[in-house]
Amino acid sequence: MYAAPLAGWAVVSVGATLFMFALMIFETNVIGLSYLIPVMLVAAAGSLLAAIPICLVFGLSALAVVERLQLQQRWQWAAAGAVVGLLIVLLLAAVPTFITPLIVAPVVVLFAIAGAIAGAVAWRERIGAGPSS
């Protein structure tokens, strides 16, 4: 049940990291594909490793909240997931790092959409179709 939302979040975190990293490189006028590719791969791997515990903490917390509130509709779970995505972006923006100025509207939207999709998938596994065996 947890694998699909976790995988989705991991892909989104890698994509957002690569997007922010690309913005950083283009803003500093670093040109050189031989330099860019290995650095972006390291950034993607790092964001993937960071995404897994973050997804587990926030995802399981969101799951506990929606079950405690007895939410039954897919859109309610999707909305809860979108809120979690926005919360993660706010926390990333609150931590002063080199990526803080690179959190722009597309990254915020990407995290909100990923959270909504993760919430809908969790709903399907938990309530909608039941666990697939």
Image (tube, helix red, strand yellow):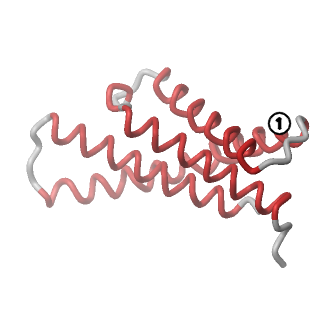
Q: Nearer the viewer, residue 78 or 5?
A: 78
Residue drawn at (39%, 46%), measured in percent from left and top? 17
Q: Which residue is mark 1?
A: 65
Residue drawn at (66%, 63%), measured in percent from left and top? 4
Locate residue 18, reporting x and y percent: 34, 49
Q: Quadrant of the N terminus?
A: bottom right
Q: Which quarter of the picture shows residue 38?
A: bottom left
Q: Nearer the viewer, residue 104 or 75?
A: 75
Q: Quadrant of the C terminus?
A: bottom right
- Left or right: residue 89 versus residue 20 is right
Vertical placement of residue 99 versus 3, above or below: above
Residue drawn at (47%, 48%), measured in percent from left and top? 47
Locate residue 77, reporting x and y percent: 74, 45
Q: Nearer the viewer, residue 22 or 45?
A: 22
Q: Which residue extends farthest bottom? A: 133
- Left or right: residue 41 versus residue 91 is left
Give the total number of marks visible in the rendering.
1
Residue neighbourhood size for the residue with mark 1, other residues' Cα within 10 Å, grouped as few (<14), some (14–19), many (≥20):
some
Q: Nearer the viewer, residue 46 or 6?
A: 6
Q: Secondary structure at mark 1?
A: helix
- Left or right: residue 7 versus residue 98 is right
Locate residue 114, reporting x and y percent: 55, 49
Q: Amino acid at mark 1?
A: Val
- Left or right: residue 19 versus residue 45 is left
Locate residue 86, reporting x and y percent: 56, 32
Residue drawn at (41%, 39%), measured in percent from left and top? 107
